[in-house]
Image: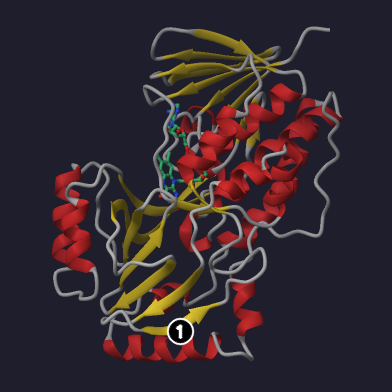
Amino acid sequence: MKNRTAVISGASIAGLSTAWWLHRTGWDVTVIERAPAFRDGGQNVDVRGVARDVLREMGLFDAVAARNTTETGTVLVDARGAVTAELPSDGSGGATAELEILRGDLARTLFDDLPDGVEFVYGDTIASVDDELDGVTVTTAGGQHLHADLLVIAEGVRSRTRAFVFDDGEVEERDLDVTMVFGTIPRLDRDDDRWRWHTAVRGRQIHLRPDPYGTIRAILAYSPGDDVLGTTRDETLALVRARYADVGWEAPRILDALATSPDVYVDQLQQVRMTTWHRGHVVMAGDAAWCVTPMGGGGASLALTAGRVLTAELANTDDHDAALAAYDAWMRPLVDDVQDLPRGLKAFAYPQTRAGLALRRVVDKVMTSRAFRPLTAKLTQVAETDRALPPLTTP
Ligand SMILES: Cc1cc2nc3c(=O)[nH]c(=O)nc-3n(C[C@H](O)[C@H](O)[C@H](O)COP(=O)(O)OP(=O)(O)OC[C@H]3O[C@@H](n4cnc5c(N)ncnc54)[C@H](O)[C@@H]3O)c2cc1C
């Protein structure tokens, strides 16, 4: 029998996981990636819950563990850097998970383990999608026509191809009014291997996290956010510098270092909520389908899991629609779980006033006290389910 064929748009965690699994079960796979070459960049992500089982099944658990960021725990610090509370980080979950990895290292681990035969088209994007009775035809901006049994859109939160297939009523892009700037900066003697997290009034956070390369990963996150989409890197950094001008601790050093950082990634947090993730021969995966943002957490875990679940559902029935519906049904509770943010979470995470910050410090103390630690540890659980992964036999 002829192999089934898939075109996957996007070569990051969701796209690579899907390519890995589909190819292992006999599909011919072509991946289209907008970037001119494989993208290695990105900062700290983690692998939690059922995604750990997916990695085990792929035989990649140890490879991911070996590329750990080396982070040993998570502490909240005041403007002098003194620790005010320590978040629980024991077991496989916790603020610092067992599997902490840089996005680029996770993507590279998947990419290096892809079986021979997965085709890549770099520097191209889909310009049109024609869903037909016998499959789907995509035409790329570079002029390629590819006909396949399945198109998987895994283009991340700002997916363009999504709008070719789903209408506005089916896609909600919910702006969380938080700007995040991620960058790699030099490590100094005073740095250590903990995730250090400082919160200042007017909704400004600073995070410093170790990596395995002798540098430090800095994150500035603030709300209300700025409109940074469409601004240049220098314009964005100027906005951020103004925003953090009066924040103490490591802010001046980070702002100076970001100006020359080789790896700056800026995002305005936006959830993506879709009423359905499939139509005809097209299916959505990862942030393009359900971006949960770092506020919810678990984007990489869900993206990793998506490839495994989608492939199993397609292997378990010849009824295409039923398979895609089963994938949707399996993934949706995991996504809903992290997208429904607790009321008041943003005000708590991004306090605006001195009184708000003082209250936050009290609550931090209570939540990290011995009595409340088990409850607090649960807050960082994502991609947790009692359900077994859908059965899948690989040849
Ligand atoms: C370079 C980079 C750095 C990141 N850094 C961080 C970080 O520091 N912290 C964090 O929490 N999350 C980060 N993320 C997001 C994180 O990877 C995702 O939230 C999560 O892993 C889900 O992955 P995904 O595969 O669904 O989407 P993404 O990781 O966003 O990947 C989408 C992929 O699709 C490609 N693409 C986009 N549009 C098109 C198109 N039209 N046609 C073809 N290809 C397209 C992109 O180049 C990218 O390779 C980063 C993502 C990228 C791409």
| Amino acid type of the residue tagged 1 in the rendering | Ala
Identify the residue at image location x=58%, y=71%: 89
Q: Secondary structure at mark 1?
A: strand
Q: Is residue 392 above or below residue 179?
A: above
Of all residues shown, which one is farthest toward the front? 189
- In the figure, residue 206 lies in which quadrant? bottom left
- Residue 230 point in image, percent of width and height: 23, 41
Q: Which residue is mark 1?
A: 85
Q: Where is residue 227? Give x, y as percent.
A: 25, 53
Q: Quadrant of the N terminus?
A: top right
Quadrant location, ligand no. 1: top left
Q: What number of labels is visible?
A: 1
Residue at figure coordinates x 24%, y 69% from the top left? 250
On the rendered image, what quadrant is the C terminus found in?
A: top right
Relative image position of residue 234 (x, y in whole percent): 15, 46
Q: Is residue 173 above or below residue 38?
A: below
Residue 390: x and y, percent? 82, 42
Q: Is residue 274 visible?
A: no
